[in-house]
Amino acid sequence: MRHGRLLLAALALLLGASSCAYYNTFYLARKYYFRATDGQPYVVERQTGQQAQNYSKSIEYSKKVLGVYGKSKWVDDAYLMWGRALIGRDDPLQTISMLQDFAARYPGSPLQAEATFYLGLAYRNARRYTPAVAEFDEFLAQAPKHALAPYAHLERARALVSLQRFADAAASAGEVLTRYPKHVLADRARAERAEALFQQGDHAGARADFRVLGDRALTDDERFRLLLREVDCLEAARQYDDELELLRRQRASLPPPVQLQPGQLAQAGADRYGRLTLRMGGVHLLKGELDRGLEAYQAVIADYPKSLLSSEAQYRVGYAYETVGEDFDRARIEYNAVKEQSAGSPFVAQATQRLANLDRIAQYRSGGGADSLEQKAEAAFLTAELYLFQLDRPERAVEEYRKVAREHPGTAVAARAMTAEAWVLARKLGQASAADSIFWRVVREHPETEAQLAARDYLEERGQEVPASLIVPPKPKPVPIPPDPAQQALTPVPTRADSLRSARDERMPRARGILSTGSAATLDSLRRAAQMPPGLPGDAPPPLGLHGLSPVPRDTTRTPPDSTARDTTRAPDPR
């Protein structure tokens, strides 16, 4: 009997030690995970790589629980911890693979709802937004009062924004503010709702959220950024007078700029006065007030000479002459002066790109010879696209397309222009019936053209039936027959250096002439050199004649300019 009691005591001690062992292993997995997330369920703002070592240790101990203590009650916890650590280590696809069958692997686990949430989070981090929304919806249906519920509403809103479902995103972020107003996520949810409302077109609601966030901002930089988002809301709503008043009031609260030596660096935040002045100049341009806009830009150039800010102001002087003044020659002069303010400014590349666009128009307009009519038409097309894609003035683009059709009646060029005009009316100006009327004219009046086929496609896209009897495809271009190599005389090999030079000189004028002429081949090469912007979501391909000039950079107080723009107008040296 005594030996039996001793045996039972030893067995209990052994089981207790084993239980402590697997619990301690899982404890270490949790310890390293929450060390990486600073005690939060996960890192809401992803910081890839900074805590990779702690995540790896969490995964290591989670695997140990599963491998060594596979029968313990902590296996589902360890499995889920492994998946969560993989998200932190920026490997969401592996988490998806693990958690998709969590319910089948651990039926009846109390962690099923959490597994669903982290599966949704993994989908969102993997940019698979539709299944992410579905998983968050399922989680909220299963556990609406779970501690992760506010996180689910926030992450669901983020996924919906990525799907461009802005109204649903704003409502989902609003759930956090309504149900959990004092939650640690409240400010993040308000910021998410503000951006969704802005994209939805509710600029007043977005501005109200940005104002609250600005009042709660902890730093001057963040407060200034949120002020500019308020300005964005007023500008998007075309409330230009209110926008100017807000900018003036804010600028009046700042000390005037101290006169700097050229190239001297200002203290942090010392350029805010100038940045507000730049925005004021932009508002004047939107109101059509060229002189007042130029005055604001020139003030920035004088107050911040030879700086990044003055280079931006100089760029916008050129932009003002190009867009509002429609003085392309003066615009070229001003764009050339950008590099004189700061050679390292990203606006130098932007100015170079816009100069290339203006130079192409000038090149076509000045062309002569047999191709002059074609060149004039191409110049008009380029001018129209300048207004459409870069200046965001579709009404002026329509005028240019109509001018081409009027000057070249009954030609394929006129058909292209009419198709382009109809596309702008339908896609940019919301005049669908007027666009359809023009498309039908192209179908009936311009057979045997690519424009007729494009017009038919647009009409059929809108559900209109175009009789096949009206369509006459363009005649195929004859395919040139390559010469027989056997019949081509080989050029004799020169025997002297003088002969080599004469042979090279004989070839060079022909090569340079090909690059300098205004032929159709040259036009095609210039088009290929132009950078094509991405198509608008949901839009049909642009019509014939839309070459796609690069868009105008936005104000750097909102979006930095594209510093990778290149000068594409320089032809390669034929040598």
Image (cartoon, rainbow, N blue to C red):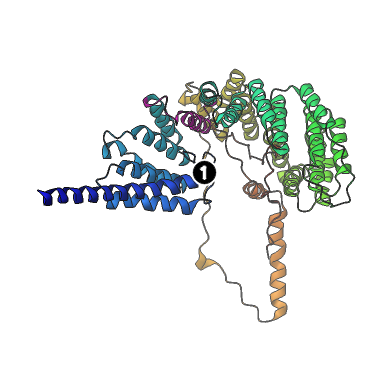
Label 1, residues with CA under 10 Å away: few <14, some 14-19, many ≥20: few
- Towards the viewer: 363 or 566: 566
* Residue 161 counted in the magenta span: yes
Q: From the top left corner, tell me how far across and down residue 86 is, in percent.
A: 42, 47
Give x and y (percent) for residue 368.
Answer: 76, 45
Most common secondary structure along the magenta stretch: helix
Q: Secondary structure at mark 1?
A: loop
Asked if residue 367 shows in the view, the reply is no
Judge by depth and name the residue closer to the eye, 516 or 260.
Answer: 260
- Give the left or right position of residue 467, taking residue 293 as reference: left
Over which residues does the magenta segment extend?
142-167
Q: Residue at position x 73%, y 39% from top? A: 376
Residue tagged 1: 38
* Residue 119 position within the rendered picture, expressed as x and y whole percent measured from the top left: 39, 37
* Residue type for callout 1: Asp
Looking at the picture, tell me which residue is in the foreground, 29 or 142.
Answer: 29
Does residue 283 appear anywhere in the picture?
Answer: yes
Residue 20, placed above or below residue 131:
below
The single residue placed furthest to the front in the displayed view is: 2
Identity of the residue furthest to the left in this view? 1
* Placement of 116 over or under 86, stated as above or below: above
In this rendering, would 559 be left or right of 439? right
